[in-house]
């Protein structure tokens, strides 16, 4: 009887510890989006492992199935869930992406170029989360990776056909606002303009991110930290347009409506 009571006491103790752990854990999702390269046609990337790093908890692995994603399909607000995990409540300051391989093709070209990933298949691409990911008990938190292919894939040296992945161009954000609109050519009827490069600049003139308008002229930027930005619209054959002092508020959408471009003067 004493053994039975001792065994039951041990089970109750384990259950209590397990319940306490569950009360102090939350769930984290890691999602992927992209600011696409204007001249690229496809950029399939194979992700095999994701880790979240905390000073208190150390390195925590995220549940993920190895998968290949063409990141260029995730522009204008497209999102792909890379993985999710239950982990202790706390602050996580870095995400590590283990990338097995990547390749790029360009519009109008048939050749496929390998993209070298420095340390990507060993220690992983180390990306600081800004602001840090706060995981709260019994809550789901999200971190979005903005791949930003326009800046992340670099030909080095230029003209060599050798491409490398620059992890410093990949952003990891937990809070952001949205800017959206539609680019048109004036006239009757109004004509949407596809393929317009929308470049976002901060108040110091530094490029933050970019995207390209869809067939209906629409665009949507979803990973902008709160602040004020300038938007530059450019497309060959049209005069460039700058939209100044676009205000972005965390958790809200700034809708710019229709933005008109006109044909360049010969």
Image (cartoon, helix red, strand yellow):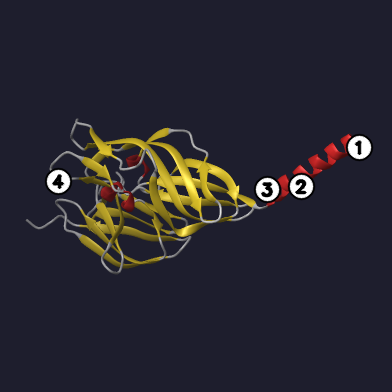
Q: Is residue 115 left or right of residue 92?
A: left
Question: Camera-side residue: 265 or 247?
Answer: 247
Q: Earlier in the sequence, mark 4 or mark 3?
A: 3
Label 4, residues with CA under 10 Å away: few <14, some 14-19, many ≥20:
few
Distance between mark 1 and mark 4 Cα atoms: 78 Å
Q: Earlier in the sequence, mark 3 or mark 1?
A: 1
Distance between mark 3 and mark 1 Cα atoms: 30 Å
Measured as percent of width and height from the top left, residue 76 is found at: 36, 48
Query: Which residue is at the far left?
Result: 266
Quadrant of the rendered image containing residue 164: top left
Query: Which residue is at the far top?
Result: 110
Instruction: Provide the residue designation for mark 3.
Output: 22
- Residue located at (49% from left, 37% from top): 64
For the residues carrying marks 2 and 3, which lies nearer the camera in this image?
A: 2
Distance between mark 4 and mark 3 Cα atoms: 52 Å
- Badge 4 marks a residue whose secondary structure is loop
Residue 125 in sight in this render: yes
Distance between mark 2 and mark 3 Cα atoms: 10 Å
Measured as percent of width and height from the top left, residue 245 is found at: 32, 69
Q: Residue 200 — which label?
A: none
Q: Residue 2 — which label?
A: 1
Question: Quick check: 4 above or below 180?
Answer: above
Instruction: Provide the residue designation for mark 4.
Output: 158
Measured as percent of width and height from the top left, residue 30 is found at: 48, 46
For the residues carrying marks 1 and 2, which lies nearer the camera in this image?
A: 1
């Amino acid at each position: 009887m004493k053994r039975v009571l001792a065994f039951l006491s041990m089970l109750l103790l384990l259950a209590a510890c397990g319940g306490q752990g569950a009360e102090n854990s939350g769930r984290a999702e890691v999602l992927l989006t992209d600011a696409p390269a204007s001249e690229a046609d496809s950029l399939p990337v194979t992700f095999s492992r994701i880790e979240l790093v905390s000073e208190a908890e150390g390195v925590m692995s995220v549940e993920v199935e190895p998968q290949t994603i063409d990141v260029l399909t995730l522009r204008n607000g497209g999102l792909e869930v890379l993985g999710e995990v239950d982990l202790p409540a706390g602050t996580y300051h870095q995400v590590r992406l283990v990338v097995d391989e990547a390749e790029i093709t360009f519009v109008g070209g048939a050749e496929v170029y390998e993209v070298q990933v420095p340390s990507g298949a060993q220690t992983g691409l180390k990306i600081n989360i800004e602001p840090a990911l706060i995981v709260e008990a019994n809550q789901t938190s999200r971190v979005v990776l903005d791949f930003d292919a326009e800046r992340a894939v670099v030909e080095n040296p230029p003209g060599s056909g050798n491409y490398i992945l620059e992890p410093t161009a990949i952003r990891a954000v937990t809070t952001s606002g949205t800017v959206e609109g539609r680019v048109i050519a004036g006239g009757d009827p109004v004509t949407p303009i596809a393929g317009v490069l929308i470049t976002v600049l901060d108040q110091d003139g530094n490029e933050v991110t970019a995207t390209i308008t869809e067939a209906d002229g629409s665009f949507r930027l979803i990973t902008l930290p709160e602040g004020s930005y300038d938007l530059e619209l450019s497309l060959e054959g049209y005069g460039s347009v700058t939209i100044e002092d676009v205000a972005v508020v965390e958790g809200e959408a700034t809708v710019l409506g229709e933005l008109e471009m006109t044909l360049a003067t010969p």
